[in-house]
Image: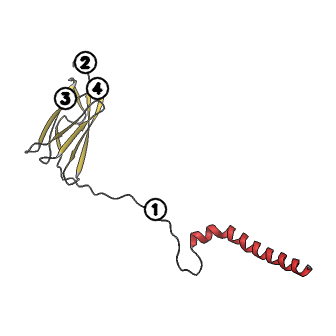
Amino acid sequence: MKRDVVIATVVGFILGGIFALLITNLPNLIKEGMPGTGRKIETITPSPPTKIITDTTNLEIQVPLDQSLSTNKTIDVVGKAKPGVLILIENDLDSKILEASSSGSFKNGLTLSDGGNVIYISAYDENGGSVTQKLTVYYTSEKL
């Protein structure tokens, strides 16, 4: 009987040791793949899709000029772009969406706030092309 207890104890220690080694090395086995399979488990991080945007809109702003001063609360934004493109004109107070005419011209009023007004004018064509221009116009109600 003593011999059976000794064999059971030795087998228990061997199985316990194998189990302990598996538990402590399991993260490494998963990361590197199982030995002998020749395959490794890899983590793949997807990258965001790349969209190439080309300037096919030919955006040209004629009025207002960058860094200009206005004593009028509203100004006209006038420019040219490719005919039929969508034009977005926006600042902190106002935003307008319009379509360039068949000749490519556009014009729309925009409300200004006191001080510096950053104006973004963007043109978007049907192929996904876009371009944005940024202007700063200063407004004062003081008569100069």
Mark 4–mark 2 Cα distance, whole angstroms, equals 13 Å
Residue type, mark 3 in image: Ile
Residue for badge 4: 113
Q: Circle 2 — which element?
A: loop
Circles 1 and 4: CB atoms closer than 8 Å: no
Q: Give residue 127's position: percent from left, percent from top.
A: 20, 54
Residue placed most toward the observer, 111 or 65: 111
Residue for badge 1: 45
Q: Circle 1 — which element?
A: loop
Crowding at dot 1, Cα within 10 Å, few <14 / some 14-19 / many 20+, comes out as few
Residue placed most toward the observer, 17 or 1: 1
Residue for badge 3: 75
**Foreground label between 3 and 2:** 3
In this view, which residue lies farthest toward the front?
1
Residue type, mark 1 in image: Thr
The residue at the point 62 percent across, 67 percent down is 27
Residue placed most toward the observer, 62 or 30: 30
Mark 3–mark 4 Cα distance, whole angstroms, equals 11 Å
Residue type, mark 2 in image: Glu
In the rendered image, the quadrant that contains the C terminus is: top left
Query: Residue 142 bears which disc, if any?
Result: 2
**Foreground label between 1 and 4:** 1
Mark 3–mark 2 Cα distance, whole angstroms, equals 16 Å
Q: Taking 50 as reference, is 28 above or below it? A: below
First reached walking from the N terminus: tag 4 or tag 2: 4
In the rendered image, the quadrant that contains the N terminus is: bottom right
Circles 4 and 2: CB atoms closer than 8 Å: no
First reached walking from the N terminus: tag 1 or tag 3: 1
Q: Is residue 93 left or right of residue 79?
A: right
Q: Give residue 94's position: percent from left, percent from top.
A: 26, 31
Q: Circle 3 — which element?
A: strand
Circles 3 and 4: CB atoms closer than 8 Å: no
